[in-house]
Amino acid sequence: FFFLLAVGALLNHQSNTMGAYKYMEELWRHKQSDALRFLLRVRAWEYRQTNKITRCNHPTRTDKAHRLGYKAKQGYVIVRCGVRRGGRKRQNHRGMVWGKPKHQGINHLKFERNLQSVAEEKVGRKFANLRVLNSYWINQDATMKYYEIILVDPSHQKIRNDARINWICNPVHKHRECRGLTSAGRKSRGLRKRGHRANGIIGGSYRAAWLRRNTMRLKRYR
């Protein structure tokens, strides 16, 4: 009911030339609207009753999934994953480091990658025969964040015969989520930049840029 009310309100304010996915996109942009707040609250309760990693029959955000490469055909899988929010506490027994005071921090530490990348890694580890294509946010509450991960079966003939997606069947793309090659992984590596802001990552990463600039190269014949 609330969903229909929200769509009706959007119909009154937007032009009639928009498609269905455009309406869904506008609805998800207004996350503090009554309709979406109600939906998110009910779905968060539902997600808490299920396993942290659950396969879904269809994507929750159809428009977002299709923008990120999902196709409603054989070989594509949608998996929902919940990850615990907050920083990463150092795993030391009783918080004792037995070292210098510099390394005695336990609580106020943050994990280097984002929670979306962690969710992709968890799903990729559980569904080891599939390849992680992309992921997107769907819900969160006080303790958990929930993402849906798009997986592709590299052994399926529908995938292997599709020229637009069979690049992921190459062995070099095994567990790309563990190597920072997905969109969320590239974000934590600082690679979502263009232009003069990307001068520090020329060469593939900021480590590669630093190494190139700080390595002395002496030609043999000079």
Image (cartoon, rainbow, N blue to C red):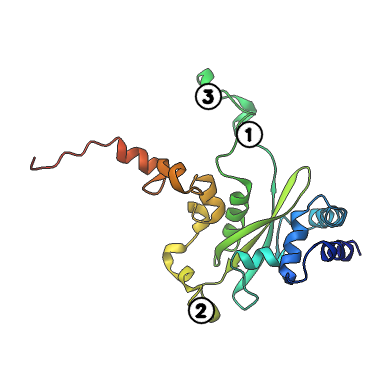
- Of helix, strand and loop, which one carries label 2? loop
Specify the farthest residue to the right: 1
Q: Amino acid at mark 1?
A: Lys
Query: Which of the two discs, 1 and 3, labels the residue nearer the N terminus?
Result: 1
Query: Which of the two discs, 3 and 2, labels the residue nearer the N terminus?
Result: 3
Residue linked to disc 2: 162
Q: Tell me whether the residue at label 2 lies in contact with that at label 1, contact meaning CB atoms closer than 8 angstroms.
A: no
- Where is the N terminus found, in terms of image quarters? bottom right
Residue linked to disc 1: 89
- Of helix, strand and loop, which one carries label 1? loop
Residue linked to disc 3: 103
Which numbered disc covers residue 113? Answer: none
Please state the horizontal and vertical placement of residue 135, each as a whole percent of the image: 62, 58
Q: Residue at x 76, y 65 (%)?
A: 23
**Which mark's residue is nearer the viewer, 3 or 2?**
2
**Which mark's residue is nearer the viewer, 2 or 1?**
2
